[in-house]
Image (cartoon, grey):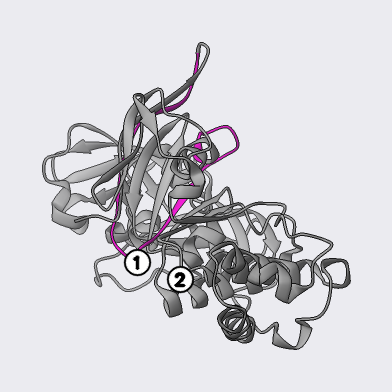
Amino acid sequence: MSKLVLNGLVRKFGEVTAVDDINLELAEGEFVSLLGPSGCGKTTTLRMIAGFINPTQGSIEMDGRVLSSPGGVVPPERRQMSMIFQSYAIWPNMTVAENVGFGLKLRKLSGDEVRRRTGEILEIVQMGHLAARYPAELSGGQQQRVALARAIVVKPAVLLLDEPLSNLDANLREEMRFEIRRLHDEFRITTVYVTHDQAEAMVTSDRIAVMNQGRIEQVDDPFTLYTKPRTRFVAGFIGRTNFLLAKRDGDAVRFEGFAIPAHLFEDGLAGTGGNLQFSVRPQSLHLHRAAPAAGRGRHAIEGRVVERAFLGEFWDYLVTPKDSRLRLRISAPPLAVYKVDEPVWVEFEPSQMAVID
């Protein structure tokens, strides 16, 4: 049995449909992110799971029990869920230890048990030495660890996080992504994580549900989502990509100015129609100064560098194929230095080219 199930979830605000027929199942201990741009319905979905908003249609079930439906809603305090907000919402007049132990006190645990569990979780989040401090004396990252500890210490059935890292600087965000994943691996709490940052979702999640205009466009593990996007929106939202239009012409797939043998693609593009659209990631294209050897399931064409930018970890090149108006964005290692206007060979890996709707 699934731990958490969203069945045909719809939420309308007047004439506006914020969430439109969401269906999603989470297994016990699974970490699933709702990823998408502002206004796509991900936070509304999370608030319905938490019980703060009633669904217009559909239902939410946990362990086979209906929590939300148009006919009735179990209140948030009876859902066995913990939620971490964007603002952390830790009490400024309480110490770190008092903040973390507050939920345990509400559950009428003994003082010794509260102190024991509070101490244990503070050590796990590396905040034991700051137990007596107040929130105003903590950095943003430390406050976030307090919020995590407070949410986890009560052993919730489901953990909900609403863009918890958006107030942190870039370096702290990167550190806390791995911290959230580490804590999940240790406690295995079923988790729903809302974010607009694809890097956060990729690092933390078992699966990612990409949302757009109130709907889920694709749900998959991070690797599949990146390498095999099903729609143009998913391909463009998860990382950078090149969109290439093509047409199947017998044994060849013809792009503007060049063609690639169809048998080099996965399954030879069996079952596809005449017109095709591909998502081609910049790092799946390779630059050479001379024509590379044929074979290896790859295909090379001539081109010319028209723009370049050095980004430290890689070069970002813009290359125009010969006899084509296309511009291909290509990522290359730092030592692969090519000049603007330099002739090059562009090597494709058709197995890494995803056909999208």
The magenta stretch spans residue 167: no
Q: Position of residue 293 (x, y in %)?
A: 32, 74
Q: Which mark is residue 92?
A: none
**Does the image show residue 356?**
no
Q: Earlier in the sequence, mark 2 or mark 1?
A: 1
Locate residue 20: give its quadrant.
Answer: top left
Q: Which mark is residue 290?
A: 2
* In the image: residue 224, left or right of residue 331: left
The magenta stretch spans residue 41: yes
Outermost residue, top direction?
A: 15
Q: How many marks?
A: 2
> Which residue occupies 11% across, 40% down?
271
Q: Nearer the viewer, residue 273 or 201?
A: 201
> Which residue occupies 43% across, 45% down?
210
Which quarter of the rendered picture does the N terminus lie within? bottom left
Q: Position of residue 12 (x, y in %)?
A: 47, 20
Which quarter of the rendered picture does the C terminus lie within? top left
Q: Looking at the picture, does residue 266 appear above or below residue 173?
A: above
Locate residue 200: give its quadrant.
Answer: bottom right
Question: Which residue lies under the disc numbered 1?
Answer: 29
* Circle 2/circle 1 CB separation < 8 Å: no
Give the magenta-colored segment's residue range: 16-42
| Amino acid type shown at disc 2 | Ala
* In the image: residue 64, left or right of residue 117: left
Q: Secondary structure at mark 1?
A: loop
